[in-house]
Image (cartoon, rainbow, N blue to C red):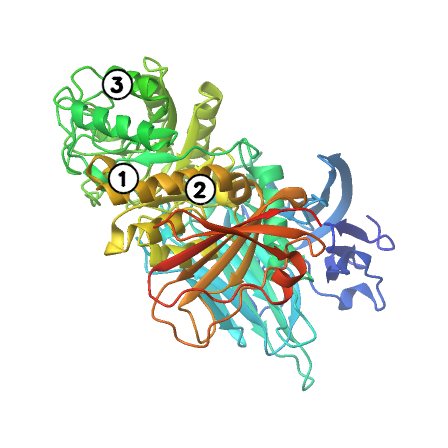
């Protein structure tokens, strides 16, 4: 790249343009819907810094890159060396290579475009060729400068922790600094999902929305630095930094080593939030998810039904009921293992991955045989990264846990194994071989992780590199996950961490679905699923019918049906009427799963914004003008006037056959309606009572 030749990143419907000024400083010449077509109209040094470095950028703002060099120099001044573009998967991989003007330190900005989806993946690589180690204190993956108006908003997804994931929270973007971060290393996304929506101008003339996702299975950070501009009435500047959270996690990089920041995936959509969602769903299917076109099974899990209190005959009974109900797979959760420290509660047994002979005297054999007999699949649960002190594993290897020189605090009576040690990684990979090897009838696993890291430290790191733990821990864990996928490619995988504690697009590359939250109260779940589905398709969103909240069973079924459907119920304990409701829900899931999991979502009536949050409606449309399904939920007593449910994603020229069900009765109809009417008039809001639901199936019936 020479000063006269800007480099353009065409991300598909939006993008960015970069240039180097006279001093070789990388400048952002354009960003946004026309950002890749920007033509410089002023000397390049007047354009914003593309990626501020400490000591070279505005001294009154925090920098995206802050490094202490081998000789103690605190400042970094990068100069562009060149740029390269190569083709990749229908898009481009653009690299802008920079080097410090004083030190042998290289920083490469990476952009991987995927124009058919409109999502841009961006990260930086830092290579240390200095004669000694350097320390990275801030290492954001992206740092664009945006103009926003005084009506700009952001939406973050964070709650109070366990069972409160994905809480939707929209707030104005006031001048000042706002940091949205998570901590804990394992299950940080319980506190804050690593996703963000920015709406730079919510005025009547703009619907622009920007969606961002940090692909990091650990602590993440968004930092929003908003400054008014001096001229009255003009836009504000937002410097938006995103990446791994470097809090207490400075990284010492040795000579010859390369540090790669997490991939931030983002998009800027003129068409608003809906377009952000469409793009993210397309991108997750095209670039992230395993087997994106494969329908996920209807799962029956035993956790909410039995916890750890079961035996072979109880499980065989539940497996039989699963088959009779018409579900696809039985998932045996926590509590099946540890012969010498029986896992009857969460105080013991983690780490000892052999069946408990008191509960499973014949191992998994009778269970997989019963599943085979019932015509269903079988899966089970592991937590390979953890150990209870009361276990054979801990007795044999007390030194395998993450720790410093202090006493290690326990959470849920357990400790974290240290995957920086090769023998621990081998053990963790071996857990899967031990469970799956002798049991070919197991073809589904739930990977759980139920405590944060405290007292981070590892003997695999020298004393002056202990803070590298937080970053190295992610890569070591991903290495184990990659080995699992390589060794057992046909096993379907769910990722869980105390609920939705590890929901990020980079970890998801190894899995088929996630457990979004332990909170399965359908009223709470509608709101969580509303947020979750803005970024991730429903095929990834495991959603089970439980007794949480004591809600009517048909309502719980209707809520679970708008995700990857399943149950966490004692099926053997259902009365006749309840069984009929569940059986109807299974039949409906069979018909609607292709729409819900593989189709396109339309968010219709919001349960998280505005005065009236008592209602929700959501539609899924099949591809290529096929059928659609619409869900309406009355969550609380009605607050305001009933809205109409207007559905935009239908074929306006088609007629639709419409059947309706609340799952308490067989569906009624069909009636017929035109796509044009359903779009302009819509359905009248049909519900009055709290915790009720209605589902419409719409099938094209010609024109
Ligand atoms: C936490 C998970 O979120 C639950 O679904 C369940 O698997 C428990 N762990 C088991 O200990």
Gap between marks 1 and 2 measured at Cα: 50 Å
Instruction: Find numbered disc 2 in the image and state the secondary structure of the residue it sits on.
Output: helix
Measured as percent of width and height from the top left, residue 524 is found at 35, 58
Real-space Cα separation, disc 3 to disc 2, in angstroms: 31 Å
Q: Which residue is mark 3?
A: 364
| Ligand 1 found in image quarter | top left
In space, the residues marked 3 and 1 are separated at their CA atoms by 35 Å
Q: Which label is found at residue 588? A: 2
User: Is the residue under label 2 in contact with that under label 3 (CB below 8 Å)?
Assistant: no
Which residue lies under the disc numbered 1?
403
Residue 331 shows in this picture: yes
Please, what secondary structure does the residue beneath circle 1 have?
A: loop
Answer whether labels 1 and 2 touch (C-beta < 8 Å): no
Residue 525 or residue 186, whichever sits in front: 525
Q: Which of the two labelled residues, at mark 1 and mark 2, occupies the earlier sequence position?
A: 1
Rendered location of residue 117, percent (x, y): 67, 46
Asked where in the image residue 443 lies, by quadrant, the reply is top left
């Amino acid at each position: 790249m020479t000063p006269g030749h800007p480099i353009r990143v065409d991300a598909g419907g939006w993008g960015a343009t970069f240039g180097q000024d006279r001093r070789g400083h990388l400048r952002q010449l354009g960003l946004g819907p026309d950002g890749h077509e920007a033509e410089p109209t002023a000397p390049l040094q007047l354009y914003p810094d593309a990626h501020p470095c400490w000591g070279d950028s505005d001294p009154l703002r925090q920098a995206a890159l802050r490094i202490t060099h081998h000789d103690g120099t605190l400042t970094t001044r990068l100069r562009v060396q060149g740029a390269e573009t190569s083709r990749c998967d229908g898009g481009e991989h653009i690299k802008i290579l920079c080097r410090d003007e004083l030190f042998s330190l290289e920083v490469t900005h990476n952009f991987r475009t995927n124009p058919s989806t409109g999502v841009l993946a961006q990260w930086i690589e830092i290579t240390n060729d200095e004669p000694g180690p350097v320390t990275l204190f801030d290492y954001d993956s992206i740092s664009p400068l945006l103009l926003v108006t005084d009506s700009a908003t952001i939406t973050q997804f964070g709650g109070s922790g366990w069972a409160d994931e994905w809480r939707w929270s929209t707030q104005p973007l006031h001048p000042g600094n706002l940091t949205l971060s998570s901590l804990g290393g394992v299950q940080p996304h319980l506190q804050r999902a690593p996703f963000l929506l920015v709406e730079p101008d919510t005025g009547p003339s703009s619907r622009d929305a920007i969606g961002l996702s940090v692909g990091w299975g650990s602590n993440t950070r968004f930092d929003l630095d908003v400054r008014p501009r001096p001229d009255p009435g003009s836009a504000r500047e937002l410097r938006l930094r995103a990446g791994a959270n470097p809090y207490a996690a400075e990284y010492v990089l040795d000579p010859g080593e390369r540090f790669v920041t997490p991939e931030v995936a983002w998009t800027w959509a003129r068409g608003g939030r809906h377009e952000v969602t469409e793009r993210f769903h397309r991108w997750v299917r095209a670039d992230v998810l395993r087997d994106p076109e494969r329908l996920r099974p209807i799962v029956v899990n035993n956790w909410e039904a039995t916890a750890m209190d079961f035996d072979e005959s109880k499980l065989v009974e539940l497996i039989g009921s699963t088959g009779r109900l018409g579900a696809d797979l039985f998932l045996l959760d926590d509590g099946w293992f540890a012969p010498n420290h029986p896992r009857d509660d969460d105080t013991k047994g983690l780490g000892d991955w052999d069946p408990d002979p008191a509960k499973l005297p014949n191992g998994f054999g009778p269970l997989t045989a019963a599943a085979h007999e019932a015509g269903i699949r079988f899966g089970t649960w592991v937590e390979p990264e953890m150990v209870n002190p009361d276990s054979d594993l801990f007795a044999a290897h007390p030194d395998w846990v993450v720790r410093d020189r202090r006493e290690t605090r326990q959470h849920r009576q357990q400790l974290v194994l240290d995957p920086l040690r090769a023998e621990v990684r081998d053990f963790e990979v071996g857990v899967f071989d031990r469970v799956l090897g002798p049991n070919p009838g197991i073809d589904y696993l739930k990977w759980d992780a139920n405590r944060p890291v405290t007292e981070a430290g590892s003997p695999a790191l020298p004393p002056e590199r202990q803070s590298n733990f937080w970053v190295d821990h992610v890569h070591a864990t991903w290495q184990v996950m990659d080995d699992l996928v390589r060794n057992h490619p046909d096993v379907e995988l769910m990722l869980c961490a105390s609920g939705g504690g590890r929901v990020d697009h980079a970890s998801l590359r190894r899995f088929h679905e996630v457990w979004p939250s332990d909170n399965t109260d359908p009223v709470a779940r509608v709101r969580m699923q509303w947020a979750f589905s803005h970024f991730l398709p429903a095929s990834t969103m495991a959603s089970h019918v439980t007794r949480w909240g004591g809600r009517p069973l048909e309502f719980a079924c209707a809520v679970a049906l708008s995700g990857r459907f399943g149950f966490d119920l004692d099926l053997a304990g259902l009365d006749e009427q309840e069984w009929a409701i569940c059986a109807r829900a299974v039949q409906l899931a069979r018909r609607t799963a292709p729409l819900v999991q593989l189709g396109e979502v339309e968010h219709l009536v919001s349960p998280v914004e505005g005065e009236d949050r008592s209602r929700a409606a959501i539609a899924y449309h099949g591809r290529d003008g096929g059928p659609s399904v619409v869900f309406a939920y009355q969550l609380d007593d009605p607050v305001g006037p009933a809205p109409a449910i207007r559905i935009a994603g239908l074929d306006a020229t088609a007629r639709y056959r419409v059947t309706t069900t609340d799952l308490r009765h067989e569906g009624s109809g069909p009636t017929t309606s035109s796509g044009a009417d359903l779009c302009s008039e819509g359905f009248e809001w049909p519900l009055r009572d709290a915790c009720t639901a209605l589902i419409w199936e719409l099938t094209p019936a010609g024109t």
